[in-house]
Image: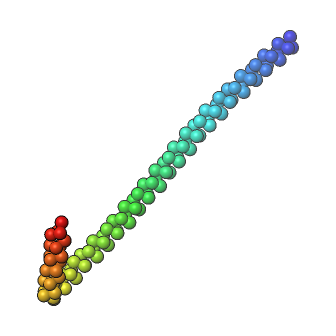
Amino acid sequence: MSNVDNMKSSTVDISGDLATLRDDVAKLATSMTQLVQQQASSATDTITRATHDARDRLSGTMSDAQQKLQSAGGELESYVERNPGIALAVAFGLGVTFGLMNRSR
């Protein structure tokens, strides 16, 4: 009978070990799920920050370019007002050049 008792004891031990193993696997799955969610959240935050930084830099660059263009336009307008004859000659020369280029086609 002691063999039967030993088998019953072993069966109980194995059942307990399996239950513990199931619990450990469930805890591991929960931990992995939380880790993946944290990593995804971290990646999303990083991408969001990078996108905002790029937008801010692009906005600053566009603002600088717009200011330079406005400044250059103002300088050109001022030059034309000071030297209307030269501006007229340049405009005439460009008109003739474009006219000749289109005529040959």
Coordinates of residue 32 in the picture (x, y in percent): 58, 40
Q: Nearer the viewer, residue 26 or 68?
A: 68
State whether residue 7 is above or below residue 97.
above
Q: Nearer the viewer, residue 27 or 42?
A: 42
Q: Residue at x 31, y 68 (%)?
A: 62
Coordinates of residue 7 in the picture (x, y in percent): 80, 16
Q: Quadrant of residue 56?
A: bottom left
Q: Nearer the viewer, residue 96 or 42?
A: 96
Left or right, 92 with reference to 20? left
Q: Is residue 25 visible?
A: yes
State whether residue 82 is above or below residue 26.
below
Looking at the rendered structure, the number of numbered marks drawn on it comes to 0
Q: Residue at x 16, y 80 (%)?
A: 93
Q: Residue furthest top?
A: 1
Q: Is residue 81 visible?
A: no
Q: Quadrant of the N terminus?
A: top right
Q: How is the image coloured?
A: rainbow
Left or right, 71 with reference to 88? right
Q: Quadrant of the C terminus?
A: bottom left
Q: Quadrant of residue 66?
A: bottom left
Q: Nearer the viewer, residue 50 or 28?
A: 50
Q: Residue at x 26, y 74 (%)?
A: 69
Coordinates of residue 49 in the picture (x, y in percent): 43, 58
